Amino acid sequence: MWSGHSPDSDAVATLVDHVLRGETAKDLPPLTATPIYAGDGVAGVLVVAGPIRRSALREAASWVADAVERGRLEASADRAEQAELRALRAEISPHFVYNALTVIASLMRSDPDQASELMLDFADYTRYSLARRGDYTTVSDEFHAIETYLALQRAVLGDRLRVQVRVAPEVLGVAIPYLVLQPLVENAVRHGIEPRAGAGLIQVTGEAEGNDCVISIEDDGVGMDPERAREILAGRGGSDSVGLANVDRRLRHVYGPWYGLVVETAVDAGTRVIVRVPRFQPGVMP
């Protein structure tokens, strides 16, 4: 940062060297410098040509240091979010993929039309889950991904799985982080419906509540102890429950601590996961 005349670059370099070494510069043009601290060390030096109060210089250096630190934190948060997204993608069950392809193969002879439809669903599912780019999508796209996944699961589980999906038109265009709803539905099937005896029901709804969009994923499966649900949201649930904690962290990172997941559950009483996001959020666009 410069003010006044432009000093000689060698003089600046010499002064910077003195400042970084904590020494006092002598016989130099009237330059004033102060180190910029960020993290655990010196990120740079603020040099001013011409008269300036020490307090003003320190205040300017502090402002620059804060800006540098914010940039570092934002970059770190972006890297963490991308890592969590990769973790979600890695959670796609090989067992489900194998079963879906096995069912499709078995239908090739007996019902080629249904096999063709399921193959298109499988292509949509894998394309959305593994190949899509971008941080945000729409409620409409997430619900479409949910429906393709559930179509495949109905083919695999047959009469054991019943599905009800209902979404209000006014929330279809709401922007949300990519891949936040699909993992919750997959979790409901894998940990709610599959372990139970007999048929199970999954209900997915989306509606507007004031300025918020509220989405509910509910199953009548085996449920869990509420304390177990709290451990899962806190990230202490083990490898089988990474999805819930991951989605909760991502929502809170984007929207703040007032948002995230709410889990209502009890043993043998099913599970309901509620997602609440603002219908309009600056910077969140598909």
Image (cartoon, rainbow, N blue to C red):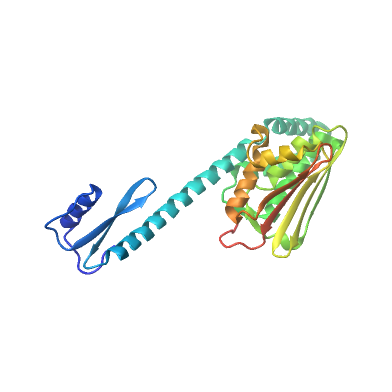
> At 15% across and 62% down in the image, what residue appears?
29
The answer to whether residue 199 of the structure is visible from this angle is: yes
> At 79% across and 30% down in the image, what residue appears?
106
> At 27% across and 56% down in the image, what residue appears?
34
Instruction: In this rendered view, identify the residue nearer to me: 13 or 42.
Output: 42
Q: Residue 193 appears at what percent x and percent y?
A: 80, 37
**The C terminus: image quadrant:** bottom right
**The N terminus: image quadrant:** bottom left
Q: Residue 237 appears at what percent x and percent y?
A: 66, 35
Instruction: In this rendered view, identify the residue nearer to me: 72 or 91.
Output: 72
Q: Which residue lies furthest to the left in this view?
A: 27
Q: Residue 276 appears at what percent x and percent y?
A: 70, 55
> At 77% across and 37% down in the image, what residue appears?
225
Q: Residue 122 appears at what percent x and percent y?
A: 70, 40
Q: In which quarter of the image is residue 50?
A: bottom left
Considering only vertical position in the picture, is 182 above or below 101? below
Q: In which quarter of the image is residue 208?
A: bottom right
